[in-house]
């Protein structure tokens, strides 16, 4: 179980860390006159294309080994393009390649978690993967902080080594599913997903080997290729629209609008050591506020995405929409705080503490929404007794893979809303005599 947890944690960490490095390096990757929003767009739109195209349009079995090798190659090529070429167009192309690979990798690892039985083991996989994605925020920001002194060419070039961790872990560390379910076994509460003794392929069947993940005897007996149609997939997706996709979309829409549109305007006077001894040790210039908000957010996201791996109970299914509701309240409150200030300019200590608290809750809600949505899908009732095992496997893989469309769409929409939001809030501050945002 330890090797399984380490494997999925590393999958989440490495798959997402390049995304964070690129965002952290945005100021160094493009000329000063280039809107930084273009980096955010190129860093999310290709991932959205991957999450839309692969689960919904492709048919048949997932070849995990081939797909992960492909993701690794695309990631490495993308980062090398960014490192080698100085032109804006080529660097944006490299960012798009890395983004596409990250999006495809995320849904692939979530789909891979459905291959493990019983439910407790599958949930363990999702929990550690979510924890790894949360840790990527902290690790990526720290790595670029250390590498940026080497310059873009060498710093990003060294980062291109990281994707090679994924195939190494997949082939040499990740336990096989049959280790956790030898012989005939069922889910914890007796519902579905029996796994018979592993079927051993004959030598002349080697060409049909799917990858390192073994199949069961019942799966091997399938002679006719099975593939879900678009109608089948729409039937599976419809019940998840309101239950899973809408809450996740709203959380990410609110969350990234806060991070990209409101947080840059949450700027206060530089504290003095006499009035605010603790704040003065953290904030040395007005440019320190935004990196601090991002650090607070990334830390709380990591902790909340690790909630299941830390042994905390998952949110009840009926409360999956609660993080989105809280995020909407936080977005509105922080927008008002930025525009008019609840405590006045003379009480910057209270304003700072208020913003710190709300951004911490924002990160907690965002992390809880991510890990609990995917955990709940992973833990849904498995195969119907008597159902074709190959079809049931593809249905599980599609359901968990299709949800990623919601969070990427929310991030993309937020990137479009963030620019006018930031401009509008800055104008509101200037109108009341607070001009810090103009000097950033």
Image (cartoon, rainbow, N blue to C red):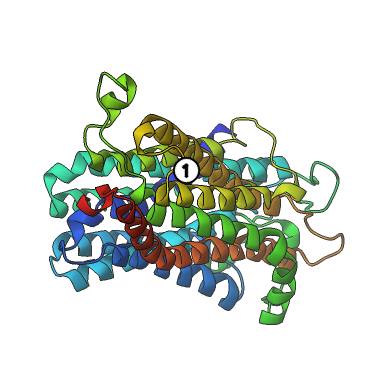
Q: Is residue 209 visible?
A: no
Left of 84 or right of it: where is 51? right
Left of 156 or right of it: where is 369? right
Residue 147 coordinates in the image, percent (x, y): 19, 43
Work out whether residue 179 or residue 380 is closer to the camera in this orientation and state it: 380
- Name which residue lies at 18% across and 69% down: 88
Q: Which residue is farthest front? A: 432
Q: Which residue bears the numbered disc 1?
A: 134
Instruction: Name above or below for residue 370 compared with residue 246.
Output: above
Residue 429 coordinates in the image, percent (x, y): 34, 52
Instruction: Name above or below for residue 202 compared with residue 378.
Output: below
Figure quadrant of the N terminus: top right
- Name which residue lies at 64% across and 30% down: 311
Instruction: Name above or below for residue 104 compared with residue 136.
Output: below
Q: Is residue 235 visible?
A: yes
Crowd class of label 1 (few under 14; some 14 to 19; many from 20; radius 10 Å): many
Left of 266 or right of it: where is 330? right
- Name which residue lies at 55% across and 32% down: 2
Residue 364 in which image quadrant = top right
Work out whether residue 281 or residue 271 is closer to the camera in this orientation and state it: 271
Residue 19 coordinates in the image, percent (x, y): 36, 55
Residue 71 in which image quadrant = bottom left
Residue 89 coordinates in the image, percent (x, y): 21, 73
- Name which residue lies at 49% across and 37% down: 360
Work out whether residue 142 or residue 94 is closer to the camera in this orientation and state it: 142
Work out whether residue 402 or residue 205 is closer to the camera in this orientation and state it: 402
Element at badge 1? helix
């Amino acid at each position: 179980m330890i090797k399984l947890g380490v494997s999925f944690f590393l999958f989440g960490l490495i798959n997402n860390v390049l995304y964070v490095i690129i965002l952290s390096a945005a100021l160094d990757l493009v000329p000063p006159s280039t809107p930084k929003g273009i980096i955010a767009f190129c860093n999310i739109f290709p991932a959205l294309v991957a999450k839309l195209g692969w689960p919904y349009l492709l048919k048949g079995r997932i070849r995990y080994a081939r797909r992960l090798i492909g993701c690794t190659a695309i990631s490495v090529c993308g980062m090398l393009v960014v490192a080698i070429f100085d032109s804006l167009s080529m660097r944006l192309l490299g960012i798009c390649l890395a983004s596409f690979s990250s999006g495809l990798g995320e849904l692939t690892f979530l789909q891979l978690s459905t291959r493990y039985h019983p439910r407790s083991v599958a949930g363990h996989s999702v929990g550690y993967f979510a924890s790894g994605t949360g840790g990527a925020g902290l690790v990526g920001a720290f790595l670029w902080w250390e590498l940026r002194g080497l310059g873009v060419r060498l710093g990003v070039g060294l980062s291109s080594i990281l994707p090679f961790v994924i195939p190494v872990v997949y082939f040499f560390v990740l336990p096989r599913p049959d280790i956790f379910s030898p012989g005939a076994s069922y889910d914890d509460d007796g519902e579905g997903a029996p796994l018979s003794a592993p079927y051993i392929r004959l030598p002349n069947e080697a060409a049909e080997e799917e990858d390192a993940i073994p199949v069961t005897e019942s799966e091997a007996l399938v002679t006719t290729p099975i593939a879900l149609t678009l109608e089948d997939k729409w039937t599976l997706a419809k019940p998840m629209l309101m239950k899973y996709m809408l809450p996740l979309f709203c959380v990410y829409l609110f969350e990234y609008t806060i991070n990209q549109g409101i947080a840059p305007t949450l700027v206060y006077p530089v504290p003095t050591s006499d009035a605010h001894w603790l704040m003065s040790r953290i904030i040395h210039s007005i440019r320190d506020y935004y990196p601090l908000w991002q650090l607070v957010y990334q830390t709380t996201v990591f902790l909340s995405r690790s909630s299941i791996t830390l042994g905390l109970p998952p949110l009840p299914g009926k409360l999956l929409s609660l993080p989105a509701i809280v995020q909407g309240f936080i977005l509105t409150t922080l927008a008002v705080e930025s525009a008019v200030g609840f405590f006045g300019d003379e009480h910057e200590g209270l304003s700072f503490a208020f913003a710190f608290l709300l951004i911490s809750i924002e990160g907690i809600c965002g992390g809880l929404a991510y890990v609990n949505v995917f955990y709940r899908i992973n833990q849904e009732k498995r195969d119907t007794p008597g159902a074709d095992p190959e079809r049931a496997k593809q249905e599980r893989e599609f359901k968990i893979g299709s949800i990623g469309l919601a969070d990427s769409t929310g991030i993309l929409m937020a990137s479009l809303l963030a620019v006018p939001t930031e401009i509008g809030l800055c104008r509101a501050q200037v109108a009341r005599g607070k001009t810090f945002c103009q000097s950033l």
